[in-house]
Image (tube, grey):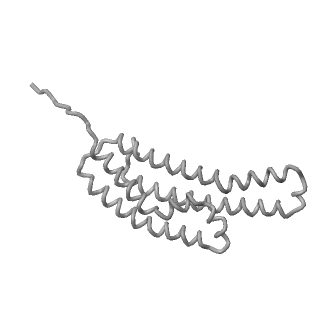
């Protein structure tokens, strides 16, 4: 049905939904990991020699690995959207369509960022959420990042040098 669907105008909406889903998922996963680590530390399983290395690796994963993974996925999504926008050939008339989709993206992005903030400030998750500084920073500035990413995507899609192809008709 749809072939060569790259550089689509709706990429920014897909980007917003994926980033929000990942941020919430990673926050829930770190909360679960923290609870598992606390349970192991407080139980009889803590008497073994391997329990200390296990809990320290869970703590390290909860504080650093999850954040770095989120930032890497976030960066690859942006790079992929920019590459996709650069490779597509579209007519400049579609500038208005990009602007409309970017406005829709802003209206979608604000409630999602506020939802993440409400989740982050929930009593049960506050301790774990305070450790996720990279994810929190991205989600606090999500609207500005989305606006910048959408604007760059629009610029890459519409303002590339295609060369001066001329036809010699005789």
Counting from the top left corner in percent of width and height, residue 159 is at 27, 45
Residue at figure coordinates x 35%, y 59% from the top left: 101
State which quadrant residue 12 falls in. Answer: bottom left
- Camera-side residue of 154 and 69: 69
Left or right of 123 in this view: 96: left
Most foreground residue, 68 or 162: 68
Percent x, y of residue 9: 36, 52
Viewer-nearest residue: 162 or 137: 137
Vertical side of 131 occupied by 52: above or below = above
Question: Is 139 situated above or below 49?
Answer: below
- The quarter in which the C terminus is drawn is top left
Task: Residue at the far top: name it.
Answer: 170
Q: Is 145 displayed left or right of 162 in the figure?
A: right
Q: How many marks?
A: 0
Left or right of 115, for residue 89: left
The image quarter containing residue 134 is bottom right
Residue located farthest toward the left when viewing the structure as drawn: 170
């Amino acid at each position: 049905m749809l072939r060569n669907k790259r550089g689509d105008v709706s990429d920014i909406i897909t980007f917003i939904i994926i980033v929000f889903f990942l941020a919430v998922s990673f926050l829930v996963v770190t909360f679960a990991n923290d609870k598992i680590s606390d349970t192991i530390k407080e139980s009889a399983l803590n008497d073994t020699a391997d329990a200390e290395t296990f809990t320290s690796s869970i703590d390290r994963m909860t504080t650093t690995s999850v954040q770095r993974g989120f930032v890497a996925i976030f960066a690859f999504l942006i790079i992929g959207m920019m590459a996709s926008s650069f490779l597509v050939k579209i007519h400049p008339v579609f500038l208005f369509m990009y602007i409309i989709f970017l406005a829709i993206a802003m209206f979608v992005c604000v409630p999602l960022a506020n939802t993440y903030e409400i989740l982050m400030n929930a009593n049960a998750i506050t301790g774990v959420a305070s450790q996720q500084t990279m994810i929190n920073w991205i989600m606090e500035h999500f609207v500005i990042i989305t606006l910048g990413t959408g604007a760059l995507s629009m610029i890459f899609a519409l303002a590339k040098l295609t060369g001066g192809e001329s036809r010699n008709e005789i």
